[in-house]
Amino acid sequence: MKFRIYTLMALTGVLLLSQACSRPLDPEPGCTFVQNADLQRVAWRKGRIVELYLHVSFPREAYPVVDRVVEKINRQFGQIFKVVGRGQGGPRTPVKDGYSTIYWMDTWESGKRTEQARTTIYWSGTEIFETDMRINGADFDFAFGPQVEPGKVDLESLILHEFGHMLGLAHNAESGSVMNVSLDQGQDRRDLTPQDESNLKCEY
């Protein structure tokens, strides 16, 4: 059975200067990134370490999954992510508060039950300043272990996909890409394809 990974919901950049008073920018190659109104790629500032928080709702037994994905991305692109807080308190639903947080949701919108996860990014100009990820723990059975399990959604594959969104990538239809829109139960997409790596190298 295929399920949709609907993500990237909040996506309006904050305009700090009026477009009438600024010089138009030349469009950039998209590289499958989210782009702003000037067709510039939206990404984290180069050299910034993105501090991540695991909300208290996020299962402790799933911490190693996040650690594996963070280590994988940092190994390939230099240190981008760092988990600085685990078991963080606060509201049980994402809010724009300046903290990039991963939540485990035990409720989900009734009209979006096939959505496995959702990542929201906030940016100003071309720079992301916050991202929040929520996992649909209400409607899916996830595999947390080091091996993919038939009949369950592989959490590592899903979180790698969501981290792609955190970095600014949109969905694509490239064969085998971790950014494909759907992830089957038991499907293994734990590694970036050469095209995924090439897309990310446009910014990182």
Image: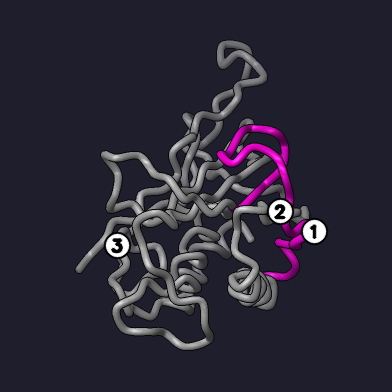
Residue occupying the point 70% across, 40% down? 90
Question: Pointer 2: what residue?
Answer: 53
Tag 2–tag 1 contact (CB < 8 Å) = yes
Residue occupying the point 30% across, 73% down? 185
Where in the figure is residue 40, as x and y percent of width and height? 52, 40
Question: Pointer 3: what residue?
Answer: 182
Q: How many angstroms separate mark 3 from mark 2 (CA)?
A: 26 Å
Q: Nearer the viewer, mark 3 or mark 1?
A: 1
Q: How many angstroms separate mark 3 from mark 1 (CA)?
A: 30 Å
**Label 2 CA crowd tier, 10 Å (few <14, some 14–19, many 20+):** many
Q: Nearer the viewer, residue 173 or 153?
A: 153
Q: Is residue 73 left or right of residue 52?
A: left
Choose the circle earlier in sequence order: 3 or 1. 1
Residue 23 among magenta residues: no
Vertical arrangement, residue 140 with respect to residue 107, above or below: below
Q: Which residues are magenta?
A: 77-102
**Label 1 CA crowd tier, 10 Å (few <14, some 14–19, many 20+):** few
Q: Is residue 90 left or right of residue 13?
A: right
Q: Amino acid at mark 1?
A: Val
Question: Pointer 1: what residue?
Answer: 84
Q: How many angstroms separate mark 2 from mark 1 (CA)?
A: 6 Å
Tell me if I can see residue 54 in this picture.
yes
Q: Amino acid at mark 2?
A: Tyr
Question: Secondary structure beneath disc 1?
Answer: strand
